Amino acid sequence: MLFPGACLVCRQPLVRIGRLPVCGECWSGLKSYHGPACAECGRPFPSSVPLLTDTPLCGLCRQGVFHFERARYFGLYEGSLRQMVLLLKFGRQEQLGYRLGRLLGDAYRFHEEVQQCRLVVPVPLHRARKRERGFNQAEALAAGVARSLGLSLNSGILHRIRPTPPQTGLSYGARRRNVQGAFEVRGRSLRGQPVLLVDDVMTTGATAHACAMRLKQAGAEKVLVLTLARAEPLVWERDAALAGSAPSPTDEGGRTPLEVRE
């Protein structure tokens, strides 16, 4: 006889056996963000005061530094969503990525700019990192997004041609230099096509900017970025460093890497 294990998010016993080791309460606890945010990159504002202007923009977007037109996300990097991002990225839960991608796509199904896109492209991993991890979490998310929105998925057009050092502790300018020249487009022309670029977490937007620049050089009309979560750089880097240094997704007690170290 098989007995369901524990939910990998809340550690409570699962009521039934399924493909995904996440309980219904944790799924229903995922909250999308509808608070004040930059009109272009989506960076959350600490208050609603910037919304009093005609076009509420953050400091970077006022300078026009990004090559993408818009960046949107499902929710803030906190609570159950934070735990699921870590499970996806470091817990080798590829099927979880597809399910979360469906959730992300469903949240933007009626978004006007998303509806204009015809192609979904994931942010690529370098081949060495993908071999180490076993899959690209952004590709799993993008597959779910494409299915939800009825769009074409192309995981082979954008490539990361060199590994990039960790971004931890770097300023925005240093992050941009870190990923400069790290991506290239191969194969088909994107002339005149609006592209939906998908990733798991957005912090400063430097990686999305570098990808969007290459996509536009290949002819993309515009680039819209969709990520599962938006995080402050220091919070995400701390979690990624802790989880990424774990020897396995869970220890003998069934704890996640963060639980082992917190």
Image (cartoon, grey):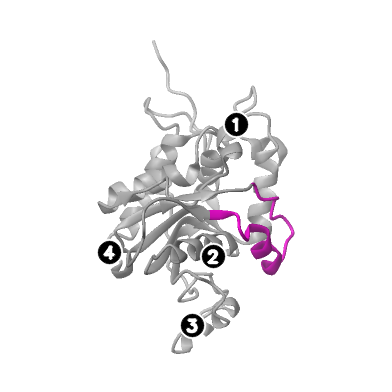
| Residue 56 numbered mark, or none | 3
Q: CA distance from mark 1 to mark 2?
A: 30 Å
Q: Name which of mark 3 and mark 2 comes first in the sequence.
A: 3
Amino acid type of the residue that numbered disc 3 sits on in the rendered structure: Pro
**Whether residue 72 can be seen here:** no
* Residue 52 appears left or right of 151: right
* Residue 173 appears left or right of 26: right
| Number of the front mark, 4 or 2 | 2
Tell me the element at label 2: helix
Q: Residue furthest right?
A: 169
| Number of the front mark, 3 or 2 | 2
Q: Name which of mark 1 and mark 2 comes first in the sequence.
A: 2
Give the residue pinned by disc 2: 209
Front in this rendered view, residue 135 or 82: 135
| Number of the front mark, 4 or 1 | 4
Q: Bin the neighbour count of mark 1 within 10 Å (Cα to Cα): few under 14, some 14-19, many 20 and up.
A: many
Give the residue pinned by disc 4: 115
Tell me the element at label 4: helix
**Magenta residues?**
163-183
- Choose top left, top right, bottom left or bottom right for residue 47: bottom right
Tell me the element at label 1: loop
Amino acid type of the residue that numbered disc 2 sits on in the rendered structure: His
Q: Bin the neighbour count of mark 2 within 10 Å (Cα to Cα): few under 14, some 14-19, many 20 and up.
A: many
Q: Is residue 231 above or below residue 100?
A: below
Q: Name which of mark 1 and mark 3 comes first in the sequence.
A: 3
Q: Bin the neighbour count of mark 3 within 10 Å (Cα to Cα): few under 14, some 14-19, many 20 and up.
A: some
**Whether residue 96 can be seen here:** yes
**Is mark 3 in CB contact (under 8 Å) with mark 2?**
no
Front in this rendered view, residue 133 or 18: 133
Amino acid type of the residue that numbered disc 4 sits on in the rendered structure: Gln
